[in-house]
Amino acid sequence: MTRVRSLVSVVDDDESVRESLPDLLREFGFAARAFSSAEEFLESDCVDQTSCLLLDIVMPGGMSGPDLQRELTLRRQEIPIIFISAHADETVRPRLLERGAVACLFKPFSETDLLGALTTALRG
Amino acid sequence: METSSQSWVRPLFIGAIQDVTESKLAEAAPRESEREWRRIVDSIPGLIATLTPAGEVEGVNNQVLEYCGRTLEELKQWGTSDTVHPEDLPRVIEVITQSMASGDPYEIEERIRRFDGVYRWFQVRGLPLRDSNGRIVRWYDLLTDIDDRKRAEAQLAGEKRLLEMVASSCPLTDVLTALCRFVEVTSADCHCGVYLIDWSGPRFRNGAVPSLPATFNDPTDGLPVRREIGPCGQAALFRQQVIAIDLETDPLWQESAIRPLALAHGIRSHWSTPIYARDGRVLGTFAIFHREPASPTRVQQDLIAQVTHIASIAIERALSEAALDKLRSELAHVTRVMSLGALTASIAHEVNQPLSGIITNASTCLRMLDADPPNVDGARETAKRTIRDGNRASEVIARLRALFSKKEFTLESVDLNEATREVTALSLSDLQRNRVMLQFELADDLPAVSGDRVQLQQVILNLLRNASDAMAGVDDRPRQLRIRTELDAANRVRLTVQDVGVGFDPQNVDKLFAPFYTTKIDSMGIGLSISSSIIERHHGRLWAAPNDGPGATFSFSIPRSSEAVPSPPNRDAVRAPAATDAAP
C-alpha cells in the first residue's frame, strides 16, 4: 500500500515561485500544487486535501495572504499556514503568528528554514 | 512702346541739358533761362535724368555722368549693361514698364554701379510731364543715394536676427556662426572668427570660424592664450583691440605663431578685438581676417563694437545656461538619491524575489543530483532557472544603477512606454503595499521622444509616488492609479498620471510646482519643482488638474523626436570657456 503524501499548496502571484517552490517540495517528498491567487486556491478542489499552505502576503488585484487566512478561518478550514514574503517587513510577523500562522518566512529563505517550518506545520 | 526686357531701353537718366534744348518743350524758353536751369540742375546735390515717353534715356545731369563714370550713350544701354545691379534689374524693368504703360509715377529702390564698380543703393522716383492733351512728353527721374540708410537698416536687421537667436536659446555655435556670416556679408571681402577662451588652460577654443578651412581652424583650436600667438593672444591678455595691418611685412608679427599659418592661407591682415563679460572678464576674441593689408574704417569699428557686444551676450548666456544645467542635474541627482531611501522596501522586494528563486532552485538542483538515480534532466532545468533568476536580480541592480548613479544630462531617443514600464517595475511592490491598483493605458506606436531617459524616469517615478501618497488615507474607494501615454492633439507625446486621492485645492495649483511647497510632513517639496524643470529642459510642459471626481491628474507633454531636439547643455559647455575662472 502506498503512503499518501501530504499535499503542500503554494499560493503566490510570482510565477517563478510557483515554478520553483513546488519542485523543491516534491524533492522533500511532498505532493505540491501551485496557485496564482487566493481566489484560484479557494475555487480548486485542493482546499480540503491541503496539509500545509505556503502563502504569499502581498498579492495585488485580489485577496491578500492575510485575507485568505481570515477566509479559511471563517470556513473553519484549519490548514497550517506558512507565510512567505519578499517584503522584509518584520512588523507584520507577530500579527500573522497571532492569528495562527505557523511561521513567517522572508525571502530569500534557506532550505533548512523551509523544512523546519514545514515540519512544525505538519506535526501539529 | 515695347515692353520686352530684351529690347527695352532704359528710361533712367535723362534731361541732359544739351538734349533739353533740342527737345520739343511744351513751353518755349529764352536761351539765358535755359543756361540758368542747366546750372541749377548740374549743381544740385542729386542725380537727375529725363526719359522719353518710351523710356529711353534722353539726358542726365553731370552728377550722373560723374557717379557712373560712363557716357550718355553707354547709359542708354542700362537695360542690358551692369548699370543696375543684376539682382535688381528684373524688378526695375517690371516697375518701370508698368508705369510707362499706365502713366503713373513710380518709385523704386535699386543698386546702381558707381564708376569704381561699387554698387550703392538709390531711391529712384519718376514723374511724367504731360502736354495740354494729357499726353506724356517726358519722364523726370530723381535719384537719391540711400546707401547709408540701407546699410544701417540691413545692419539693424542683422543685429536683430542675432539677438533673436540668442533670446531663443539657439546653440552658441549657431549664434556665433551667424554672427561671423553677418559681418562677412556686411563688411565684404573678409573672414571672421570668434575664439572662446578657457581660462583654466588658458586656451583658445574655436567658437565659430565659418569661412576658413579646417586646415586653418584645426591648428588654432586649443592654442595657449599667450602673447606670442599673435593678435588674438595679445588682445586677450592686454585687454585691447589689436590691429595687424600686414602680417607679412610688419616686423611686430614676424615671430608670432599664427603668422605662417595665416600666410599659408593667403591671410595678410588680422584684427582682434576682446569680447568682454559684463564683469570685465575676457570671454574670447573676435577676429577679422583680410587677404590684403587692411586697417579698420570707422564704419567697420562700429560694426565690430556691435557684434562683440552681441557675442558677449550670447557667450555669457550660454555659460550661465551650462552652469544652470549642471546645477539642475546635480539637484536632480540629489533628489533621486533621496528617493532611494523611500524606495528601499521596493528595491529589497525586487532583489529578494529572484534571490529566493536562486536559493530554492539551487536546493532543488542539489537534491535532484543526490537522488539515486540522479534526476539529471530535472537538475538541468532547475539550474537553468537559477541562471534566469540571477539575471533577473542583476537587471534590477542595473536599473538601480542607471537611475541613481548618473548625473549628466544625456540626450537619447526614449520610448516613453518602455521607460514607464521600467520605472513602475521598480516601484511596483511599494505601490502594491499601499494597495494601489495600477492601470496602464500605454498607446501603441507611441513616437519616441528625444531626452534624458533617467531624468524622464525620475519625473514619472515622482508622479507615481505623489499619486500613491495622495491615496494613502483613502479607504472608501479602490486606490486606482492610471498611467496613460498618448500622442496629443498638438502632436506631442503626453504622459498622464491620474489618482483618486485627496487631490489639491485649485487655488494652490501654481504653488504645487514651486520649490519647497509641500502638504506632506515627510517631504521637502522639491519633487514637482525638479520634475517641472526637467520637463522644461525637454521643451515640454508639466501641469496638474483636479479631477471631476476625487483626486488629481498630473500630465506632461514633450515634443516627439523628429520635431525638435532639445539642445543638450553639454554641447555648448564643451565649447564655452570655464564659467568660474577669472581673467588673469
Image: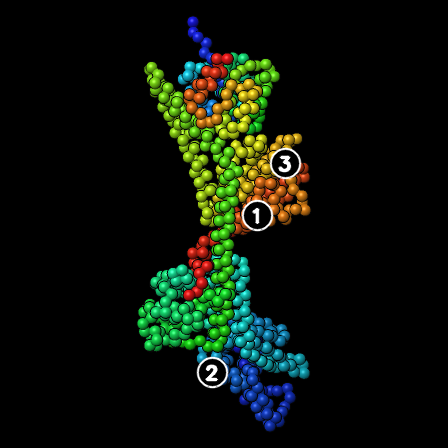
For the residues labelled 1 and 2, the Cα–Cα distance comes to 70 Å
The residue carrying mark 2 is B69
Q: In this rendering, would B192 be left or right of B63?
A: left
Front of the two marks 3 and 2: 3
For the residues labelled 3 and 1, the Cα–Cα distance comes to 22 Å
Task: Give above or below for B150 relative to A20.
Answer: below
Tell me the quarter of the picture where residue B379 sits.
top left
The residue carrying mark 3 is B500
Image marks 1 and 2: residues in contact by CB distance under 8 Å: no
- For image coordinates 44% across by 70% down, the residue present is B239
Position in image of residue B292 (x %, y %): 38, 75
Image marks 3 and 1: residues in contact by CB distance under 8 Å: no
Tags 3 and 1 on a common chain: yes
Q: Secondary structure at mark 3?
A: loop
Task: Give above or below for A27 relative to B194.
Answer: above
- For image coordinates 54% across by 89% down, the residue present is B18
Amino acid found under the numbered disc labelled 1: Ser
Name the quarter where the C terminus of chain B is drawn: bottom left
